[in-house]
Image (cartoon, rainbow, N blue to C red):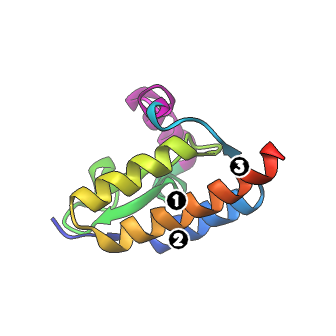
Amino acid sequence: MAVRLNNKAFAHAKRLVAEQTVVLDERDDWSEHRPSSKAENAYLEEHGFIEYRSWYLGIDDEQAEENKGRYKFPYGDFEKVHRCGVLAAESRAGQNDYTDIELAAAHLHGMLEELRQRVQR
């Protein structure tokens, strides 16, 4: 599997965090907050793969462009960046030695923690 960082998704996520379009949830919330397959399909039907892929930090070059399996490491719910999604992506990327994705997720994690600190003041 040739998985690499999706730079456009990374830029999209950074912009959303800068705009505070986020959910500052807890690490273990991702199983409940992650979009279901039904939600993914509905989003795809309405927006297409160009917008769909902007919600995934990883791209598997061995999969066809219009295949959901091509897009890895989701970080949000198609509306907002979820802290728990970023943490899950960071952890999974590290476990699988996808260093570029792990570092991107770590960067987003840092941005979210900075925002979280400002909100708590």
Q: Find residue 17 and report its horizontal and vertical position in percent.
A: 68, 58
Screen quadrant of the N terminus? bottom left
Residue at the limit of the structure toward the front, as seen here: 121
Q: Amino acid at mark 3?
A: Arg
Q: Are marks 2 and 1 in contact (CB under 8 Å)?
A: yes
Q: Earlier in the sequence, mark 2 or mark 1?
A: 2
Label 3: element kind? helix
Mark 3 burial class by Cα count in 10 Å: few <14, some 14-19, many 20+: some
Q: Tell me how far mark 3 sits from mark 2, CA to CA.
A: 24 Å
35 shown above or below 120: above
Q: Name the residue tied to disc 3.
A: 116
Q: Name the residue tied to disc 2.
A: 8
26 shown above or below 118: above
Label 1: element kind? helix
Magenta residues, start to end:
29-47
Q: Amino acid at mark 1?
A: Ser
Q: Write down the quadrant of residue 38 in the picture.
A: top left
105 shown above or below 30: below
Q: Residue at x 19, y 66 (%)?
A: 62
Q: Residue at x 54, y 35 (%)?
A: 26
What numbered label is drawn on residue 54? Answer: 1
Q: Tell me how far mark 2 sits from mark 1, CA to CA.
A: 6 Å
Q: Amino acid at mark 2?
A: Lys
Left or right of 70 on screen, residue 90: right
